[in-house]
Each structure stands twice: as structure tokens, then as C-alpha cells.
Amino acid sequence: MKKKLIILITTLIHLLISCTNNDDDSNNFDSSTNELINGIWTLESAHGGLEGRNSFFSNNETIEWNFDINNNTLNVVNNIYIESEYSFDPERLKSDIYAYEIKNSNNFMSLIINDKEMGIITISKNKLEVDTGLASDKFLYVFKKKSN
């Protein structure tokens, strides 16, 4: 019960922090969102799940996502692939090139990979968060910008 309460509080804090009017944080899908997402992102951490996991990834455990806004492709380089039925968690995307799009619905941006919704994204200059449903025992993935 404590874990669920901690996850709920963490989610609420995350939502409050994410709701800013800072120009660095763009939650409106437009050309600036494309410019922000373009480039290479490295998975730093994963939080949540039924057991309340907090995983931080080292240099040996790397997952890189390279968004190419010109071709609407996502090139995944995954050095810690985990076989699972949940094929659209970042840890479970095999190294490959995928089609992606970002859809804006009710002021939330959803990341779609190969026609399947990955989750809600929050993006700033150096940080990309993908929320696959943290409030419902899923995960929040945090990526750090590596380069454009």
C-alpha cells in the first residue's frame, strides 16, 4: 500500500512540475516540438511498475533513440533488450528503425511508434519523459539529450 501511495504522490508531483509556462518546456505540438525532439536521446532511468521499480542505467546499459524529423523515423540502438509481451516499453524495443509520430490530444502529446501509442511525452531542451501510465502501475521513462 505504501508503494502505491508513493507512486501516486510521485505522479502528482510530476504533473505539477510538468505544468509550467517556461519557454524551455514545450507541450504544444508544433515546429518547436519537432526541433526539440530531433536528435539522439539516451535512456537515463525508469520509474514505476507494480513493484515500484526505480532503475538507473549505466554507460554499459544503453538505449539510444535517434529521432529523425525529416523522415519521421526513430532509430533505436538497444544494448539491454529484454524479451517480453510488452513490446513498446523502451527496454523492449529492439535495435531497429521505426516510424513515429506525435499526436496532440487535449493538450497532451502522445508518442506513436509503428502505429501503437507508446505514452504521453513531456519534452524540454535536454529531457524527454515518456509516461506509459505511471498512475496505473506502468512506467515513466526519462531520456537525456545526447546530441542533435
Image: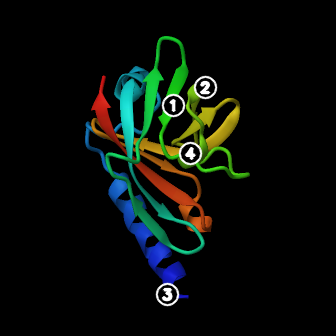
**Going 54% across and 20% down the picture, which residue do you hit?**
73
C-alpha separation, residue under disc 4 versus residue under disc 1: 11 Å
C-alpha separation, residue under disc 3 versus residue under disc 4: 30 Å
Looking at the image, residue 110 sits to the left or right of residue 10; the answer is right
Q: Which residue is mark 2?
A: 98
Tell me the element at label 4. Answer: loop
Question: As drawn, which residue projects farthest toward the top?
Answer: 70
Q: Which residue is mark 3?
A: 2
Q: Which residue is mark 4?
A: 81
Q: Nearer the viewer, mark 4 or mark 1?
A: 4
Mark 1 and mark 3 in contact (Cβ < 8 Å)? no
C-alpha separation, residue under disc 1 versus residue under disc 2: 8 Å
Q: Nearer the viewer, mark 2 or mark 4?
A: 4
Type of residue at label 2? Tyr
C-alpha separation, residue under disc 2 versus residue under disc 4: 16 Å
Q: Earlier in the sequence, mark 2 or mark 4?
A: 4
Mark 1 and mark 4 in contact (Cβ < 8 Å)? no
In the displayed structure, would residue 21 be above or below residue 138?
A: above
Q: Give residue 3's position: percent from left, percent from top.
A: 50, 81
In the displayed structure, would residue 129 be above or below residue 97?
A: below
Q: Residues within 10 Å of mark 3 (few under 14, many from 20)?
A: few
C-alpha separation, residue under disc 2 versus residue under disc 3: 38 Å
Q: Residues within 10 Å of mark 2 (few under 14, many from 20)?
A: some
Q: Nearer the viewer, mark 3 or mark 4?
A: 4
Q: Earlier in the sequence, mark 1 or mark 2?
A: 1
Q: Residues within 10 Å of mark 4 (few under 14, many from 20)?
A: some
Q: Which residue is mark 1?
A: 76
Mark 2 and mark 1 in contact (Cβ < 8 Å)? yes
Tell me the element at label 1. Answer: strand
Type of residue at label 4? Tyr
Q: Give residue 38's position: percent from left, percent from top.
A: 39, 24
